[in-house]
Image (cartoon, grey):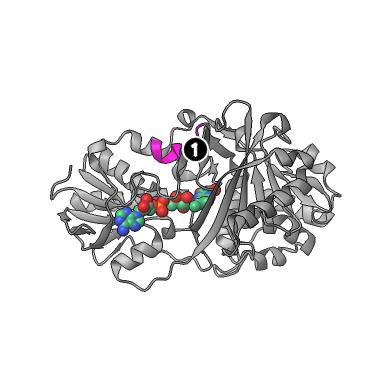
Amino acid sequence: MSNAESVLIVGAGLSGLACASVLDKASIPFLIIDKSEEIGGRIKTYDYDGYRLDAGFQVLLTSYPEAKRFFDYDKLELNFCYSGSMVWYGDCFHRLSDPIRHPLKSLSSIFNPIGTFGDKIRIGLMRLGLLSTTSLQNDTSTLEALERLGFGTSMIDRFWVPFMGGVFLEKELKTSVRKFEETFRLFSKGNTAFPRLGIGELPRQLAHGLDKNNFLLGQKIKAVTSREIFFESGDALRGSHVVLAVEGSECERLLGLEITTSWNSVECIYFGLPDRVLPSREPILYLDGEGAGPINNLFFPGNLSDCTPKGKALASASIIKPSGKDTEEDMVNAALAQLKKWFGASVDDWQLIKRYQIKEAIPKCTKPTIQELATNGIYRCGDTSGLPSLDAALKSGRLVAEKIIEDRN
Ligand SMILES: Cc1cc2nc3c(=O)[nH]c(=O)nc-3n(C[C@H](O)[C@H](O)[C@H](O)COP(=O)(O)OP(=O)(O)OC[C@H]3O[C@@H](n4cnc5c(N)ncnc54)[C@H](O)[C@@H]3O)c2cc1C
């Protein structure tokens, strides 16, 4: 448990856990508090009806620099996605492959209707670093950057919008070009991976080495000072430092600042299907190149991880910018109608397993700025500290811990 020398970390998502694990290695006492009964924040995997379900479709890019530092990839038993996607357009799927890793498959798709010949050459040039957006201002949108690179509408609307839209969780591609550049570079440098037991293994692995007595779960914090935290229950705790590792908007609220963080939302619907009607065992992402929706992207997670009961397969469908007005029945029926177009009559055997509606999934990132490590003596970390990603969360937690270690010496 904690004493007045402990660092009090509010938030047991990746940023809080990264901060705790760096402090722990330096033998600095800490207490990590979360309002949820479980660790992981936005990264959780739930056991449900024999399935293992990630709360939203998330992937680990093995080239994330901080992830390499914090995680033991072998113990996560990572499996990798195909570098490319299947794009639905004009009544069938078209394969789009990474030209460097799959040159032959890439060549065979050069004349498909997902972009022009010139657009495919442009992707190749970007992969080789011969075409880039680094000269563009931070507040340039990804859409504008793609247009300036010379991509035509058939490539932007049919590939970039569903693909980057699925990463940013917004389909207008208003997200800053800096996030686009980072994402493209990281996808190119490494693999897109899933831990065998689900994405929730990431926080679980970080917490594994930490003493359970240093966790206080199911306790919401309502106010903080630079040395004290106040629980909703009315209790208070004093420590050597206070770290806010909560979501950006909650952090601003606790610091009494104007709320500037806004969010991109997503809905993830899981369908269970008999293994015998699984459309493909290839670990590849399916994209809606027509923009007709409601599903933007679909993946069969059982092709890469152990997440299904025997004889069953699983489909994870992501819906971006759900209207919020649809009933569950309307949304599920619309999704199934789209899937029937994609995969045919066997979709009659698919069944709704679970629907996750995530309003605060990824902070919007239109004008990236550098966030101070502390405000009024209160430390802050989390994915709003950088270009939002799980890696930015890890990095910010590490930097705050290193600053505290420096302060104490
Ligand atoms: C559906 C979805 C898909 C995503 N896809 C990807 C992806 O593919 N790749 C990628 O890199 N990133 C992805 N992300 C983003 C990634 O999950 C986040 O960037 C990362 O998990 C953020 O970690 P964090 O520690 O900053 O915040 P969080 O995980 O949000 O942790 C904050 C913690 O603070 C706690 N808390 C908040 N307020 C209080 C309070 N008052 N008192 C006590 N506790 C409090 C919360 O309960 C929570 O546990 C995705 C996110 C979602 C939701």
Q: Nearer the viewer, residue 364 or 373?
A: 364
Question: Residue drawn at (64%, 52%), measured in percent from left and top?
Answer: 332
Say few, some or many: other residues with alpha carbon within 10 Å of mark 1 (under 14 / 14 to 19 / 20 or more): few
Residue 378 found in image quarter: bottom left
Q: Nearer the viewer, residue 293 or 396?
A: 293
**Residue 63: image location, x then y, percent:** 53, 42
Residue 201 found in image quarter: top left
Residue 198 is a magenta residue: yes
In this figure, what is the number of numbered marks? Answer: 1
Q: Residue furthest top?
A: 310
Q: Secondary structure at mark 1?
A: strand
The reply to whether residue 336 is in sight is yes
**Residue 229 as seen in the image, left or right of residue 388:** left
For residue 364, above or below residue 110: below
Question: Residue drawn at (53%, 48%), measured in percent from left and top?
Answer: 56
**Residue 360 as seen in the image, left or right of residue 215:** right
**Residue 235 as seen in the image, left or right of residue 13:** left
**Residue 359 as seen in the image, left or right of residue 371:** right
For residue 67, above or below residue 403: above
The reply to whether residue 380 is in sight is no
**Residue 401: image location, x then y, percent:** 29, 49
Q: Nearer the viewer, residue 239 or 408?
A: 239
Circle 1 is placed at which residue position? Answer: 48
- Mark 1 lies within 8 Å of ligand 1 (Cβ measured): no
**Residue 102: image location, x then y, percent:** 74, 38
Residue 299 is a magenta residue: no
Question: Residue drawn at (73%, 41%), measured in percent from left and top?
Answer: 348
Chain part drawn in magenta:
197-204
Quarter of the figure with the N terminus: top left
Q: Amino acid at mark 1?
A: Tyr
**Residue 303: image location, x then y, percent:** 63, 33
